[in-house]
Amino acid sequence: MKTKKQIQSKITFLLGLILLTTIACERELSEDVVEATFTLNPEVYIDGFSAGLEYYPYLDSKFDAFSVDTEVKYSGASSMRFDVPNVGDPSGAYAGAIFRDDNGGRDLSGYDALTFWAKSSTAATINDIGFGQDFGENKFQVSKRGLRLSTNWVKYIIPIPNPSELHQESGMFWYAEGPENDNGYTFWIDELKYEKLGTIAQPRPSILNGDDIVVNSFIGVKINITDLNQTFHLDSGQNTTVSAAPGYFTFTSSDPSVASVSEFGEVLIETDGQTIITASLNGIEAEGSLTINSVGSFSFAPTPSRSPEDVTSIFSNHYTNTPVDFFNGYWQPYQTTQSADFSIDGDDFLNYTNFNFVGIQFANPTVDATEKSNLHFNMYIPDAVPSNFDFLVTVIDFGPDKVNGGGDDTKATIICKKISENYCRFMDDN
């Protein structure tokens, strides 16, 4: 098992604009004035950091995971060494950091890929590695997920989805990696730089993993377009896919009056009706789409009125919730339920689609419900409820060992029988 951690001032601009306008009225600008440019330096690490580059480990990572190694290197005098910690290492659960240019950024528009040589102390797979993360907007972040390493030096290529966007990029390199099978290991990177290869071809962008997704939703709901990718063909004959930030894409709504979409891929449903969200990258239409069927305003559940001391809350905006391990276990192959949670005006909803069953686990810590024996939740079913509708709820007590399936579990099932168009009543299964 691998563990993974998932890991501008408007006033200043306005004053600068006024000042420039005033000066322009008084005299003509010199023809010698040139537009500010940024360094074209493609090097990140070649026997040492390039000028302006700084190392910033993630807050909860192993801070000393990175070092310079003069013994193991692909070329030159040194390489970058990364020591991934074991599970339980008190100095950090994983290794991860960004390497940022603190001199204002670089113009990378003339390159088409980040390249490097790498090897590992054992065969391993890096969770995430790429560029464009700067602890700021991360507008043009790129990640190569699941990069496989071997014990031999291999050259790796991470293509840039659209180089013309990178005229001032600060995020030169970043990575995040956890233990492999609970064990730490070491990997090395050398000759880390940007290149113009000219052999990266056949760009094929996609959104939503290339799927055409249809959702029913409501006015006020915000939906983020996710799973944005760009696939390229390399001169090795292989295809490679990178995850690309929304900033590389141009999003379009077929009916903006129904739902608008921002440059960051956030869709806001404005009214009832239907619209289709599509995207393109550098003029190439992306595979995949999101069809939104807005059915109008959402019917909110009544505001809870019980006193907080009488409630053990699992999911609510009105009470303080207990810690929850997950709201959907995604148990395969029998479970078909997916999650499409949403929020309206700050009110959060668990939204289950393709529902057959779902598990909500709160084991860390478990909940003592001996003095609060009532179970309450509000359930919204947008379509007509079938006449033979039964909704089963099973509550499992993990027993003294507090472990699911530990041999001392007890369970009770209650059935919600339909009694009217909008209500069902829970009855003990026994």
Image: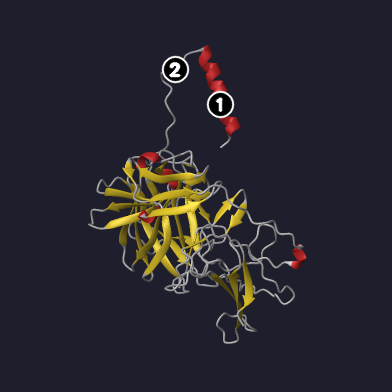
Residue 52 seen anywhere in this rendered image of the structure: no
Residue 7 at x, y percent in the picture: 51, 59
**Disc ID at residue 16:** 1
Whether tag 1 and tag 2 are in contact, CB under 8 A, the answer is no
Residue 272 at x, y percent in the picture: 51, 44
Residue 364 at x, y percent in the picture: 62, 72
42 to 175, vertically: above or below: above
Residues 205 and 201: in front is: 205
- Around disc 1, counting alpha carbons within 10 Å, would you say few (fewer than 14), some (14 to 19), or many (20 or more)? few
User: Which quarter of the picture shows residue 70?
Assistant: bottom left
Q: Pick whichever of labels 1 and 2 is earlier in the sequence.
A: 1
Which residue is found at the position 41% from the left and 46% from the top? 276
What kind of residue is marked 2?
Answer: Ser
User: Which quarter of the picture shows residue 210?
Assistant: bottom left
What kind of residue is marked 1?
Answer: Gly
Residue 226 at x, y percent in the picture: 44, 53
Please, what secondary structure does the residue beneath circle 1 have? Answer: helix
Quarter holding the C terminus is bottom right
Residues 12 and 256: in front is: 256
Residues 312 and 233: in front is: 312
- Around disc 2, counting alpha carbons within 10 Å, would you say few (fewer than 14), some (14 to 19), or many (20 or more)? few
Residues 337 and 138: in front is: 337
The CA distance from mark 1 to mark 2 is 18 Å
Residue at label 2? 30
User: Which quarter of the picture shows residue 277?
Assistant: top left
Please, what secondary structure does the residue beneath circle 2 have? Answer: loop
